[in-house]
Amino acid sequence: MTESAASKEANGGPCHGAANGLEVGRNGFVKSQKHHKKSSHPEEKVHHSACNGGLYSRPYIESFEETPMLVAVLTYMGYGILTIFGYLRDFMRSWKIEKCHIAREREEQKDFVPLYQDFENFYTRNLYMRIRDSWNRPICSVPADKMDLVERVSYDYNWTFSYTGRVVKGVINMGSYNYLGFAENTGSCAEAAAEVTMKYGVGVGSTRQEIGNLDRHEELEKLVARFLGVESAMAFGMGFATNSMNIPALTGKGCLILSDELNHASLVLGARLSGSTIRVFKHNNMQSLEKLLKDAIVHGQPRTHRPWKKILILVEGIYSMEGSIIRLPEVIALKKKYKAYLYLDEAHSIGALGVSGRGVVEYFGLDPTDVDIMMGTFTKSFGAAGGYIGGKKELIDYLRSHSHSGVYATSMSPPVVEQIITSMKCIMGEDGTTIGRERVQRLAENTVYFRRRLREMGFIIYGNNDSPVVPLMLYMPAKIGAFGREMLKRNIGVVVVGFPATPIIESRARFCVSAAHTKEMLDQALSAIGEVGDLLQLKYSRHRILPTLDRPFDETTYEECED
């Protein structure tokens, strides 16, 4: 792994000393003051930290270990073998030797434009179906720290499923976005939601602009604005639509959108619907972003070379597949330098980062007013549904009359609104307790512990040390389904992800750490992961962290494996 842009000096300023008992070496990387063992391959860096001319008030440590060459070759070979057998099975289906269960064109419609593209469905037909049992598992309980799963079986290689009538109880939930543990059916949030349901009902039956604007909606938006530290905020009933329906209201023809290559599908869809010109920069790469900004300023629009009406940078707080945290101080510095606008999606970072759970802006100690459009969702840390946009009052007033999601969508359900209000007040400490602050702190501790233990075991883990999204690399296609099944046998529910959601050789299991997880639960999950890792030979990392029981919170010791 090579040194990134953020680990170099910026604007001619020196890299200042890092916090948390770490000091910065001459190469710009943060190293431990005590237990640091020199690598036998100094050009390979698993962890790096950025100070970047004093932009960062804390060490920025991320890990993206390179895929081992042998693993990459075997992964490509695995996909190649699957493809060959897929074409063989398609040949057998075409000759009626094997029954085809997937939707296809009727014989009498063969002269029409096809609804189903045969090649596009090849992956679904021959690869996805073989491991489909790893997804869409129905649960029959609250998706809290533990959950109950409805048992199902398939007798035709996952084309159809049958339910056995049994329930698998007490499965440790390592897959839900329940970062602060508010997805629960007991406690103050559940009681408040039940009380509001009795008063207002479940549905509103109208839009906000007609007769669906409740006093609870008004209170929610004022509370969100205070929580974010912005002038005003607007709430929406669906997180995905918050992005996809509001970006078109902010930009249009003659505007330029600069989008991170790993942005969520909702951001991508919103950018496409806007009609703006879209240019993509490399993930979290500030050199790539600055190059696009320079080109946009120098060359302007294609053909006419007129200046762009506006330039909008789209980024996320925490990237849900990589576990990485946006280099927000550098993004803000660039957007100020080139007079661009910044759209920050905090779907995964709000509630999960920062001392008081106020997201990536608080995490880096930045001013919320430096972010032009602050977007987030209520579906993760708040245990509810919907999304919000915060910013200047002029921006929110504009969106109230121009946002498709705000004008035409049905108002948020009252019990959902109350769940958000109660949980947000709990995080802010306005409920008279310290429960919210304790949950934020527990999530941070669980995240550091879980990530450190996985690295000690020898797994390749992606992302930032403080990110509760923890991708564990599986690589090979056969191991995607095998890992999910083996973990479920050990009563651990996990999410496995493969192509096309990830690059073809970077299949992974994605764990989501929660404040609701106790140390005993995490240890049980880690024990099962280690056991399955040995069974499936998943411990690919060539960088081992030496486990020490008395290691301080922020110090890490490494050794390089020669094999």
Image (cartoon, rainbow, N blue to C red):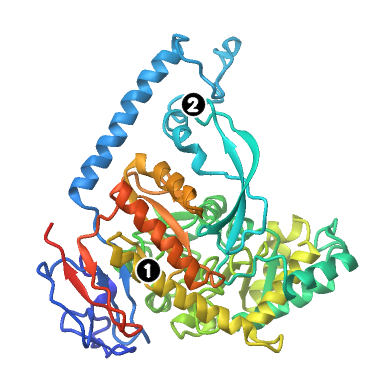
Which comes sooner in the sequence, label 1 or label 2?
2
Residue positioned 49% across, 43% down in the render: 134
Judged from this view, the residue extending furthest toward the left is 40
Give the amino acid type for the residue marked by disc 1 in the picture: Arg
Residue 25 place in picture, x, y as percent? 18, 84
User: Which of the 4 image quadrants contains residue 337?
Assistant: bottom left
Residue 289 place in picture, x, y as percent? 35, 66
Residue positioned 27% across, 90% down in the render: 16
The answer to whether residue 441 of the structure is visible from this angle is yes
Judged from this view, the residue extending furthest toward the right is 199
Looking at the image, which is closer to me, 395 or 260? 260
Reading the image, the residue beneath label 2 is: 117
Tell me the element at label 1. Answer: helix
User: Which of the 4 image quadrants contains residue 418?
Assistant: bottom right
Reading the image, the residue beneath label 1 is: 451
Give the amino acid type for the residue marked by disc 2 in the picture: Gln
Residue 371 place in picture, x, y as percent? 51, 76
Residue positioned 39% across, 15% down in the render: 91
Residue positioned 22% across, 78% down in the render: 29
Looking at the image, which is closer to me, 240 or 516? 516
**Local crowd at mark 1 within 10 Å, few (<14), some, or many (≥20)?**
many
What's the distance in space between the residues labelled 1 and 2, CA to CA? 42 Å
